Structure formats: structure tokens, C-alpha cells
Amino acid sequence: MKCRTCGTKAVVNMRQHKLALCKEHYLEWLPLQVERFIKKYKMFSKRDRILIAVSGGKDSLALWDIMYYLGYKADGIYINLGIGSKGDYSDISLQKVKVFSEERNLNLHVFSIHDEFGETIPEISQRTKRGKNRACSICGLTKRHVLNKFARDNQYEVLVTGHNLDDEAATLFGNTLHWAGEFLLRQGPVLVANGGLVRKAKPLCRVYEKEMAAYAVLKNIDYIYDECPFSKGSTSIYYKQQLNLLENNNPGEKLRFYVHFLKAKEDGLFSPLNSVQQSLHDCPECGQPTSSPGCCSFCKMKIH
């Protein structure tokens, strides 16, 4: 297989795009694709104060690298969830994020769940029994709370995450299976600021996970290869496996599934729902916006 641009040996063959590229041209091509999506969906500009959530995995670190390459000034935030014993999962991922930011002279904030709330994510999960003793729902709820509050308190205009196409397609698949209208309505490349919720953007929403992995390897980005120990058997991984079966037989199927959904929304698929704005109020405990009666879900979890 030869590179379409220069004719030398290709190192990446993307059947979904009918495109093969050598290392040099792939490392030029992918950032340009990301910038195209940033502009297409009006995610943010180089004037905005940007905060990117980094986990130590390939997607968030590679995205930070791409944004740095494109000239977007973004600070990073790593949330230490306290997963694993000392020197294990969370410590390893934090170290990789620190090295990455220091090598590029990027500003990194580190937020410790244990230092702030007195418990790690696994400890909160065990205490509350929320999510049938699985830490995933606790983790997601806590990260959303922390990221929004930190971004708002520190005057960041947009919060960026490294969710890739595989993540977005799996979420869309699950929400469609359950006809979760409210979640379908909110899903998209950008979630606009609303009632104390900062703007959120996903520049990788149309980039395959394999494309991000190839970029990270070719750029020698040192990321944590291991999946979170709590992710084993998760519903999202099962949905990804099912979508991969479709993709293997029909390259580009995941991308078409997601892009056609966005087009359907744009054409008014959810127009009756669009007129119904979710009612938000400030949580009396933490001040964060919430649609739950009384305290927000995060504070209810802490209290109970």
C-alpha cells in the first residue's frame, strides 16, 4: 500500500476513508481534520480560554498535542480519581500527563478527589452502593461535577474532552436502543453554555479511535495503555464491540451512523423537544446548576 500523497510506503491504511498515508503525511492530515471539525461545529476559537480534560490515555493526550500544534492555547486538568493502590493506575496515568505537559511547557492543573472530598472514587462507590457497586456511574457523575465547577470558577470559556467517534457512536447506539430522548437531544459536538454549565466541545467526535492510536504511536506520545480496571464488562464497551462488527463488514459505518444523526437533528428531527428547555436551578449545597429537585445528584451522593 502506497501513500496517496507522495507514493512512498504507507504506514496507515484507513479503509473508512479509502485513504492510505505515510507517517509524514498522516501527521499532517489528522490535525487538519481536527481543525476542520473545530471550525465546522464552531467549537471554540484561538481567543477563547480553553480547558482540556486529560486522563493519561491516548485520546486526550493526542488531542492536547494536536491543539498545541494548531496553535490553540489550552490548559489541562487531570482528575486524580484514586483508582488502584499507590503506584498503580491513577498514579501511573498522572505521571504520564505530567511528563507530557512538562515536555511541551503546557499548564496542567491536578485535582485530587481524595484531597477535596476525603474519599477516592472506589471508596465513594463502596459507601454509596450507587450503580450496583460499579464505580463507573460515580466516576462519571463526579468528573462532570468537578470539571464544570473548576472551569466555571477559573473563568474558562470552554471545556474540551477527548471523546472520539467510537465513544460518540457507542453513546448514540445506547441512547437509540433505549430511545432516551433527553440524552439524544443533548448529544453533539458542542454543548452550549447554559445556566451555569460551561460550553463543552469534542473535537475528536468524527475521528476513529484507531486513527488517534496511530497518531499517538507515530508521535511517540507516552500514554497509559491499560484500560481503567472498572471498565471491564461495561455497557459502553459492549456497544463498541457490536458497532465494530458492523464496521468490519462496512468500513465507514460508524461515521455514517453518527454524521447522519447530526444531520437529522439539524433538519429538525427533535424540533418538538427543542422548544422544551430543561429547567435549571442552583444547588443549595454547592451552587452548581442542576435539574434535580433540591440538591444536585453529586451532593445527594455525598450526603447519603
Image: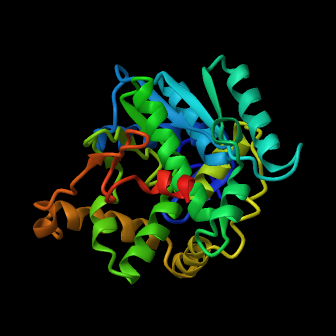
Whether residue 4 can be seen here: no
Report the coloring of the rendering. Answer: rainbow
Query: In screen coordinates, is 243 left or right of 291?
Result: right
Identify the residue at horizontal 68%, vertical 62% (top origin): 127
Return the x and y of residue 235 as percentages of the image width and height.
Answer: 58, 76
Return the x and y of residue 233 as percentages of the image width and height.
Answer: 69, 76
Q: Which quarter shows the N terminus? A: bottom right
Query: In screen coordinates, is 158 left or right of 170?
Result: left
Identify the residue at horizontal 49%, vertical 78% (top origin): 250
Return the x and y of residue 36 as percentages of the image width and height.
Answer: 37, 40
Q: Which quarter shows the C terminus? A: bottom right
When asked about the image quadrant of residue 132, the answer is: bottom right
The foreground one among 107 and 276 is 276
Identify the residue at horizontal 17%, vertical 68% (top origin): 270
> Residue most toward the top?
105
Query: In screen coordinates, is 84 left or right of 134?
Result: right
Query: In screen coordinates, is 204 left or right of 218?
Result: left
266 above or below 28?
below
